[in-house]
Image (tube, grey):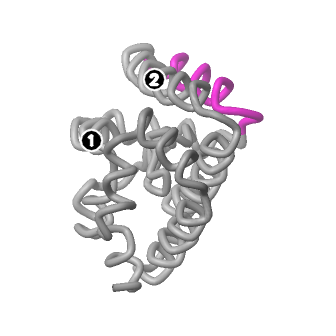
Amino acid sequence: MIRQIALIVLLFTQFLLVPAFKYEDIPADYRDLMPPEARDFLQNLSDGDKTVLKEVFKAGPYKNTEESIAALKKKSPELGAKVEKLHAMVKSKIAALGPEAKGFAEKSIEIARGIKARYYTGNEPTKDDLKASVKEVLKLYKAMSDAGKADFGKQFPFLAKVFESGKAAKFAGEN
């Protein structure tokens, strides 16, 4: 749903309609790649929040993130406001990026959204699926120019650090 949360892969916190599964169900090394905002959001979901997210997701598909947030706010105004705030933060960071870094961020979100959707449909991705997604995002990151990477790092320093430190490569089996 809200794509910014999974933002691992951009790893983005956009992902955001967050998965209706337990945070602990996410492989530990994959969790380490998540931005702090996404991790905090997931860890602080109550069972009721997870149920609402699952119901809203299953009622989709939605044309866009804004439509899914509106549906969420109808079910749970408080949870909807939290998701909207997180989405707005990510959206403003993406809007501040130059074309190259923005393209990378948007493609990463698309990849993460695909992974996230699988959790909701009962077709949970395997660790190999997660590795392949991280590998794809890492390949896109490495293909950016130094200026594009620097631009991305200004808005998403945690994620840039993950990509540069080798954590993502290690998870993807490249180290």
Based on the displayed image, in which of its 4 quarters is residue 50 positioned?
A: top left
Mark 1 residue element: helix
Mark 1 Cα shell of 10 Å, populated few (<14), some (14-19), many (≥20) = some
Q: Determine if the magenta segment contains residue 83.
A: no
In the drawing, what numbered circle is on residue 36?
A: 1
Give the residue type at disc 2.
Met
Residue ID at (42%, 26%): 86
Disc 2 target residue: 89
The stretch of residues the image draws in magenta is 62-76
Q: The C terminus is located in which quarter? A: bottom left
Residue ID at (72%, 36%): 62
Cα distance between the residues tagged 1 and 2: 13 Å
In the displayed structure, would residue 170 be above or below residue 142?
Answer: below
Mark 2 residue element: helix
In the displayed structure, would residue 158 be above or below residue 74?
Answer: below
Q: Residue furthest front?
A: 146
Q: Determine if the magenta segment contains residue 67.
A: yes
The reply to whether the C-beta atoms of the residues labelled 1 and 2 are less than 8 Å apart is no
Give the residue type at disc 1.
Pro
Residue ID at (60%, 44%): 101
Q: Relative to residue 61, is residue 77 drawn left or right? A: left
Measured as percent of width and height from the top left, residue 34 is found at 33, 52
